């Protein structure tokens, strides 16, 4: 949507993701999967980076080899490993199919989440966006993962990043 190019989105049920046909796209039966000429791509950040590379004119990713591009990679990986990792630890405790929630795990994961949110807030400073104060793949990943805390009802967003997530969620796309 940010690129303004046509795409087909298919929402797939949890059960359908376990079929052999879907597992041929993603061996673990997870989403998302991007089907492109040459074969499927899975992992959110990987497909996002691929789409940005295929649409360089949109400016969602900095020039190859630039410091800004390295920072965009950094934030994409940070979002998917550090921030989302903490949130998934919480989710495994509080979502309906979880066993009896372990308060210690939730507390430790929430502490880790707040620390990662603080890192993101520190990088933002007074800017609207993470890298060069320009909207990019870094903001798509970090904003969506931080927003997952709220939308997944996992934990409160720290005030120091709530306005950033609100600003990103207000974008038309």
Image: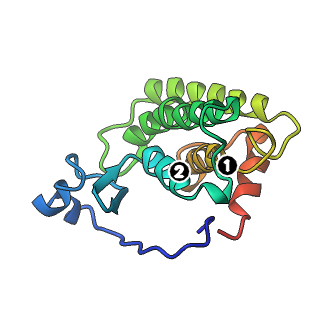
Q: Residues within 10 Å of mark 1 (few under 14, many from 20)?
A: many
Q: In this view, does 145 lie to the left or right of 158?
A: left
**Residue 112: which numbered mark, if any?**
none
Residue 157 on image: x %, y %: 67, 43
Residues 131 and 112: in front is: 131
Q: Residue at x 43, y 51 (%)?
A: 47
Q: From the viewer's perspective, tell me whether residue 44 is left or right of residue 37.
A: right
Query: On the picture, is 171 further left or further right than 89?
Result: right
- Front in this rendered view, residue 100 or 106: 106
Q: Residue at x 55, y 36 (%)?
A: 79
Q: Along the line of sight, which residue is nearer the eye, 74 or 126? A: 74
Comparing labels 2 and 1, the label whose residue is closer to the camera: 2
Tag 2, which secondary structure? helix
Which corner quadrant holds the C terminus? bottom right
The mark nearer the N terminus, 2 or 1, is 2
At mark 1, the secondary structure is loop
Residue at the left extreme? 20
Tell me residue 72's x, y (percent): 62, 37
Residue drawn at x 33%, y 37% is 100
Residue at the outermost right position: 126
Residue 141 shown left or right of residue 129 in the figure: left
State the residue position of label 1.
Answer: 136
Image point (55%, 34%), residue name? 83
Q: In which quarter of the image is residue 40?
A: bottom left
* Pick the front one: 72 or 112: 72
Measure the C-alpha gap from mark 2 to mark 1: 12 Å
Q: Residues within 10 Å of mark 2 (few under 14, many from 20)?
A: some
Write down the quadrant of residue 19 in the picture: bottom left
Q: How many marks?
A: 2
Q: Which quadrant is the N terminus positioned in?
A: bottom right
Q: What numbered label is drawn on residue 53? A: 2
- Looking at the picture, how far across and down is residue 160, in whole percent? 78, 38
């Amino acid at each position: 949507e940010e690129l303004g190019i046509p795409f087909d989105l298919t929402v797939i049920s949890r059960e359908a993701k376990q079929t052999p046909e879907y597992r041929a796209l993603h061996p673990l039966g997870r989403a998302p999967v991007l089907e492109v000429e040459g074969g499927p791509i899975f992992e959110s950040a990987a497909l996002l980076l691929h789409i940005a590379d295929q649409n360089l004119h949109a400016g969602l990713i900095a020039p190859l080899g630039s410091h800004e591009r390295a920072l965009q990679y950094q934030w994409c990986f940070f979002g998917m490993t550090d921030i989302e990792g903490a949130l998934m630890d919480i989710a495994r405790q509080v979502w309906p199919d979880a066993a009896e929630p372990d308060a210690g795990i939730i507390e430790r994961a929430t502490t880790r989440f707040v620390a990662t949110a603080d890192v993101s807030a520190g990088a933002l400073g007074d800017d609207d966006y993470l890298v060069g104060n320009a909207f990019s793949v870094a903001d798509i990943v970090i904003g969506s993962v931080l927003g997952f805390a709220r939308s997944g009802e996992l934990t409160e967003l720290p005030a120091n990043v709530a306005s950033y997530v609100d600003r990103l969620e207000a974008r038309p796309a």
